[in-house]
Structure formats: C-alpha cells, structure tokens
Amino acid sequence: MDARVLQRLRRKVGRGERLSEAELQRLRTAADIEGGATLGITLGLALSNAGADAEALSVLGALGESTDLAHARARALVWAERTAEAERVLAEAVFAHPRDVELRKSLAVLALRRGDRSAAERWLLDARSLAPEDQETRDLVEGLTAAETAGSTLEVLLEGRHRGAWTRFWPLTAREHGGLRATWTDSEADPSEQEILSQVVPLLAATAGAEMLAREGPAGLVIGYAADGVPLRVHRERSQPRRLETLDAVAWRNLESRSGQPRAVIVDRGRPRLSPEPLGLWALCEADGSDGARLLTRSQRDRLFQDVGPGPYRVSLVRRELALVAPLLDPAAVSSLDSLEPGPDGIPGRFVLMADGSLQRTAG
C-alpha cells in the first residue's frame, strides 16, 4: 500500500472514523499481502471502529507483543465494553516494559473511566517518577488536582486536551468525545478555516452550551456544528452572524453527501446491539455526533425508506453515538426503542420524523 494512503487511513482510524467498505477491504488486502505490525494494528482498530469487536481482537491477538499493540488491544477491548480486560492487557505490558511511561498514563485514564481516582493517582505518580519532564503527565496530574474543586474528573481531564493517552480511548469523532473546540471567526478565511469548511457538519443538541456556535433547530432543539468531530464555538471577542448562514448551508450540504447505512439493532438490557436480522429497530451509527441531524437530510430519508420502509418513524436521540428509529406503526419496535438506556450526552425526549422530513417532539 502506498505510504501516503496508509497514513491517511491511519489518521482516520485513529480519530475513530468508520472506514468505507472499499477502504476496509483495501486495508484487509494490504495486511494479508504485506503483513507487518503497522498494517495489522490499523486493520484491527478499523474493525473496532466498525463494531466488529470479535474480529478486531482476533486480528490484534495474532500480532505478537509490543507496547503499541498493547495500546491497540486495550482500545479495542474498551470499545467492546471489556474494560477490566483492557486494564489487564496494559498491566501485563507494564510488567514486560517496566520503564514505559505511556502504558502508565493509559492505565490512569482507564482507572478514571471506572471511577477509581486513587488508582489513577498511583499510576500517574509512577509515570512522573519515571519521566518528571513529561508534559502530558503534568497535565493529567494538574487535571486531577483541578477536579477537586471543578466537578467531574473526566470532564476536567478531557477539556482542552486533544492529544496523548486519553485519545486512545476517546477518539474525537467516535463513541465518546472530549472538550477540544475549533473556532469560527469573522475574519477572512485562512487555510485552517477552509479545512473546517470542508469538514463541518451540523449536529442536534438539547440546548446551546456555553460558547457553542448554534442556531434554533426543530422540535425545541438547537443545531450546532462540528468539524472533524470537534464542536465549533463562538469566538470570545467577535460575533459571526453574517457568516453563520453560510456555515449552516455548507454544513448541511456536507452532511447530505454523507448519509449512513441503517443497521438492524436490538436493545439488550438497555444497550444497543447489532442484530443478525431485521426486527423492526434500526440505528444510524456513524459515530460522529451527527446521526440525529442526518435524519433531516433528503439522502438519509431516502435510505430509510428503502431499508426500513415508509415512515413516519419514532426516533430516539438518547445516545450521542447513534440515532435509533422504528416505524411508528410497529408497537413492538417502538417499545424496544423506549427501553434504550440514555447516555450522558444524549438528548432526552420522544421524537417523530414525519414523511416531509420534519422532526416533531411528542408527549409521553
């Protein structure tokens, strides 16, 4: 595989993006033919991004041992909701590589994920003793200290930190997200803003958070914007009403060209799972935060009509990483949809997507 193509795919995979079928097949072929740890790890993580957890772990498990592989296996295990196993993989790697600082930082992040602050502190103190000048370790220690007076430890650690240990388990465009924000100003567009414009898409939110660049949306919601998974914010010192209209039009045009494949799911003990056969409940799970907004595009409604059947559809947005839909006239599917356990960043409420593309909030 051409080195430039591989680098581009590695960046997409690292951000948690789902590769297209063609990209994934190209990666499979290259891994089969060329071999090597780099291709194998990239393929394993790409499969994890696509929700193929068992295959991802099988691919990664066949690659041998290294610190990079330990991190990759741990991330795949976390995404498969097997956090204890992920920590065990990293701890075994620490035993094999006793002076590796990155492994300790990753263990600290996973300890925080399950709420064990004391374990996180122990791993960070260990990392700091090995590498007292490591800036990320300092940042994580400072974040723990700040969290004593500033709410959730994870929120404090994630806010503003877009590289390093935590991104292995919270890729910017995937199932969870951090606090990095891009800016949008009234100044003339420069190359960085042009890049934002090419990637920006709309997203639905319950309310406009502090500094969130947003406008009024349907069904009592607001429409925000994200570029490459990063929410855009209002510049502190400028207003941008003149350009918001342009940004909004570009965002919807971008999203119109990125419709997602509806996937059959079931709800198992409050959690969504892929289903081997259609049972009436479907999900958009592009995992970029914009699946709810996708439902409002013509291209996505056409795919729903083709794969799910004619609407209207009951819609659940209670999980940020996906949007669930069920035919409104299928009571079993609607009941299953209502049993979904809300996520921390989801949008509460019951919604109906009408045949004309309008989104309405329903009572009860």
Image (tube, grey):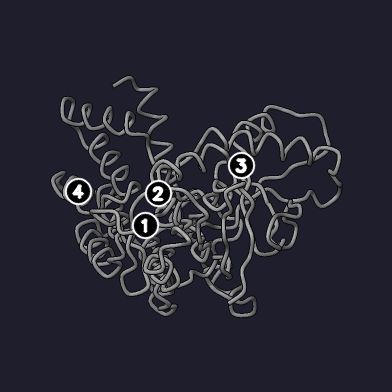
* Looking at the image, residue 152 lies above or below residue 256: below
Give the amino acid at mark 2: Val
Q: CA distance from mark 3 to mark 1?
A: 37 Å
Give the amino acid at mark 1: Val
- Mark 3, secondary structure of its residue: strand
- Mark 1, secondary structure of its residue: helix
Q: Looking at the image, which is closer to me, 234 or 134?
A: 234
* Looking at the image, residue 320 lies above or below residue 1: below
Going from the N terminus, do you reach mark 2 or mark 3 first?
Answer: 3
The residue pinned by badge 3 equals 201
Give the amino acid at mark 3: Val
Q: CA distance from mark 2 to mark 4?
A: 27 Å
Q: Nearer the viewer, mark 2 or mark 4?
A: 2
Q: Looking at the image, which is closer to me, 43 or 272?
A: 272
Please indicate whether residue 127 sits to the left or right of residue 47 in the image.
Answer: right
- Residue that sits furthest to the top in the current view: 2
Going from the N terminus, do you reach mark 2 or mark 4 first?
Answer: 4
Going from the N terminus, do you reach mark 4 or mark 1 first?
Answer: 4
The residue pinned by badge 2 equals 308
**Residues tagged 3 and 1 counted as in contact (Cβ below 8 A):** no
Please indicate whether residue 149 sits to the left or right of residue 42 in the image.
Answer: right
The residue pinned by badge 4 equals 55
Give the amino acid at mark 4: Glu
Q: CA distance from mark 2 to mark 1?
A: 49 Å
* Looking at the image, residue 322 lies above or below residue 123: above
The residue pinned by badge 1 equals 101
Horizontal and vertical percent for residue 294?
Answer: 55, 46
Q: Looking at the image, which is closer to me, 4 or 56?
A: 56
Q: How many C-alpha atoms fall within 10 Å of the one at disc 3: few (<14), some, or many (≥20)?
A: many
Horizontal and vertical percent for residue 104?
Answer: 35, 62
- Mark 4, secondary structure of its residue: helix
